[in-house]
Amino acid sequence: MKPILKTTMLAALMASAGLAWSDDTIKIGVSGPFTGGSSSMGVSMRDGVRLATQEINKAGGVLGKKIELIERDDEAKNERGVQIAQELINKEHVVADLGFINTGVAQAAQRFYQEAKIPVFNNVATGSILTKQFIAPEFSENYIFRNAASDSIQAPMIVEEAVVRRGFKKVAILADSTNYGQLGLADLEKALTAKSIKAVATEKFNIKDIDMTAQLLKAKEAGAEVILTYGIGPELAQIANGMTKLGWKVPMIGSWTLSMANFIDNAGQGGQGARMPQTFIQEPNTVKRKTFIDAYLKEFKPKNNRIDSPVSAAQAYDSVYLLAAAIKQAGSTDGVKIREALENLQTKVDGVVMVYDHPFTKSDHEAITANIPIYGEVKSGKVVYAYEEDRLKGADLKLKDSKAKAK
């Protein structure tokens, strides 16, 4: 047999087995905003992925190979996310992608992975639609997975905190103009309708807006008792600063992004007391969490020993272990086989957010259910448990509860 023909046949056989015959590593894409206003989420996510990968590689890797991370900064731009997806698929030949911070970027880019039959882990993006873009009956297979709390979980929690727990009846909503903000707004309005409440003011703002006076004055004049938010750190800080400027202070309750460092730092005293759903708080209340936090702080040395976005880092860290477990179970890096393994994962994964026991099925690609998140609160420059009962139960191991569906 001629050498060239023999090599070609070997490559074909290895490819049919789902193995990258010429590579000695398993390439995994990591895409997110590592610069700009979303970067506190993106960098924390990337570093959580790096930390888990270091641990796995130190322990021998997966299928006898080391994981190689192919990192790309999508700058929170939809078009950049699309370019990166095509590059990672066609040039780098990644076997999976981890990341997606921004809902709009995910919506635009993850279809390329779907078409290529390459699994995607949305380990931060929360738009309710993301895992439902490619579902039956139109699509027989769905390659989009998530281990973040979707907005269909968060929005009812926000309304529950504002309306039920704290008794506010006149609520205003301020949401940014991105896909994330407007889809979150729709989820909030749905949750408010379920409580027979209509917002007294609903205002929009753009990314990089620095003056929220007009929106806040409308909310104030409408008699708002609380501001519900859907946006990201820098603009959320401008809402808090705008209230300080007006001498008008009402509580801020919003999506998990109120925990971002660039909200806490830029809002200063005006951000104190803001509350939001959280899947993870930087509290070493289990051995696993203490090990993770200590290792993260030692490796990346964040300012004031505070992870910029603890939720992003923790969910990203767990996503690597979930993916590694699926590849090991599949015995292959073939996308179809990895997807099938994820949908019937036989190994429990002891994560820092929760214990993942059969986190996915063929029809359910959401690892996080409504029983997992708790309420966080900004206090003294960091996020802490908003309720003592949650803090006391913080060490309890949580499992997915398929009955705890979003409202």
Image (cartoon, rainbow, N blue to C red):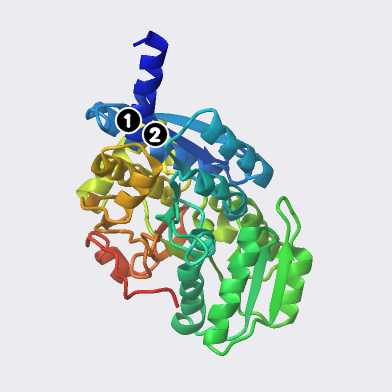
Q: Is residue 100 visible?
A: no
Labelled disc at residue 50:
2
Q: What's the distance in space between the residues labelled 1 and 2, CA to CA? A: 6 Å
- Residue at 54% in and 52% down: 264
Left or right: residue 178 compared with residue 391 = right
Query: What amino acid type should be assigned to the residue bearing mark 2?
Result: Arg
Of the pair 198 and 186, the residue shown nearer to us: 186
Q: Is residue 303 above or below residue 251?
A: above
Q: Is residue 204 left or right of residue 4?
A: right
Up/down of 2 relative to 258, above or below: above
* Quadrant where the image shows the N terminus: top left
Q: Residue furthest front?
A: 1
| SS type, badge 2 | helix
- Residue shown at the point (29%, 28%) measured from the top left: 57
Residue 86 position, x and y percent, is 59, 37
Residue 240 placement (x, y as % from top left)? 63, 61
What is the secondary structure assignment of the residue under circle 1?
helix
| Residue to which mark 1 is pinned | 54
Looking at the picture, tell me which residue is in the foreground, 104 or 159: 104
Q: Amino acid at mark 1?
A: Gln
Foreground pick, 216 / 33: 33
Residue 338 falls in image quadrant: top left
Evaluate if marks 1 and 2 touch, with contact meaning CB atoms under 8 Å apart: yes
Residue 34 location (% of width, % of height): 56, 37
